[in-house]
Image (spheres, helix red, strand yellow):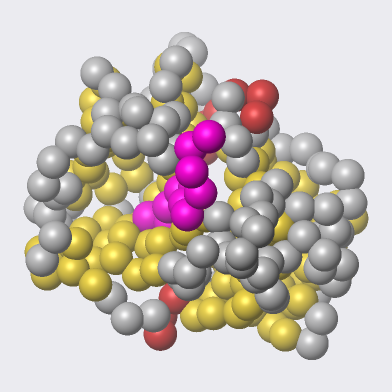
Amino acid sequence: MQHLGYTRSSHQRDHLLLTGDTFVRAPLPGMEKATAIVHVSPAAGAAFTQYTVEFEAGGSVATAGHQRFLYVLEGEVTLGSRTLAPDQYAYLPADCSTPIAASAAARAAVIEKPYRPLPDAAAPHLLFGDERTVPATPLDGDPDLEVRALLPGHAAFDFAVNTMTYQPGAALRMVEIHVMEHGLLMLAGGGIYRLGDHWYPVTAGDFIWMAPYCPQWFGALGKTPAKYLIYKDWNRHPL
């Protein structure tokens, strides 16, 4: 329930923070017994679209058109003969026409982006993974800040998706400013995010979009680790 118009959500020139109290649900074409919370899209200036899809029992989402990354948040979803549980994920190339389906209520994060081919690299194929089995790498040597790369780093992929886990009190060592844009979904815990000249408390369930060159920094607060799923464009020249 809204409290006299108050919300932590904020829409600025170079960033967007969306909190659960402002989420709006609507079906997208190709969805049956499912709705989407569209967090960011080209309408906001992003070069990709990210949404959370909420499945009813028997729900499905068509997949043909653009490449997609799917990360299961709750329940189980199927892609053909493969069943994915929470923290498991799939990369779907643009020519994949197998629908994503759920036999019971489920939620998943979906990232869509037109593929940018390279003349000397074949487009990637369908890929499945489990975030829990991906090796963790300390960011800048800090053992309290772990990065797990969910997609291979080779040039066939034109974007990257990672999870980042911060132990309580851990923080980025610098304010980052770079050409890549980000889509970030808070999965657990919370902390303080600096975006541009604004400082925001953030918690599990929040979504953040960061435009290219948006100053950004995060520090974890609380007694439990903070974790987020983060997208960035990658492996392509800015032109």
- Give the residue drawn at x 72%, y 85%: 82
Residue 190, image x, y percentages? 28, 48
Q: Quadrant of residue 40?
A: top right
Q: Nearer the viewer, residue 54 or 147?
A: 147
Q: Describe residue 33's horizontal placement relative to residue 48 as left or right.
A: right
Q: Position of residue 62 (x, y in %)?
A: 86, 59
Is the residue 163 above or below the residue 238 in the image? Answer: below
Residue 16: image location, x then y, percent: 46, 27
Tell me if residue 153 is in the magenta stretch.
no
In the foreground, 100 or 7: 100
Compared across the picture, whether 126 is left or right of 175 comes to right
Residue 116, x across and y down, in percent:
65, 50
Residue found 48% across the figure and 69% down from its top: 154
Q: In this rendering, does residue 183 appear at all?
A: no
Q: Residue at the far top: name it.
A: 4
- Vertical relation: 145 (above or below) 186: below
Q: Nearer the viewer, residue 212 or 165?
A: 212
Say above or below: 237 vs 117: above
Say if residue 116 shows up in the picture: yes
Extreme residue in the front direction: 120
Q: Residue at x 51, y 64 (%)?
A: 155
Residue under the image location 47 percent in, 52 percent down: 234
Query: Does residue 230 belong to the magenta stretch?
Result: yes
Residue range corresponding to the magenta coloring: 228-239
Figure label count = 0
Q: Judge from the rendering whether residue 206 lies leftward or rightward of residue 81; answer left or right.
A: left
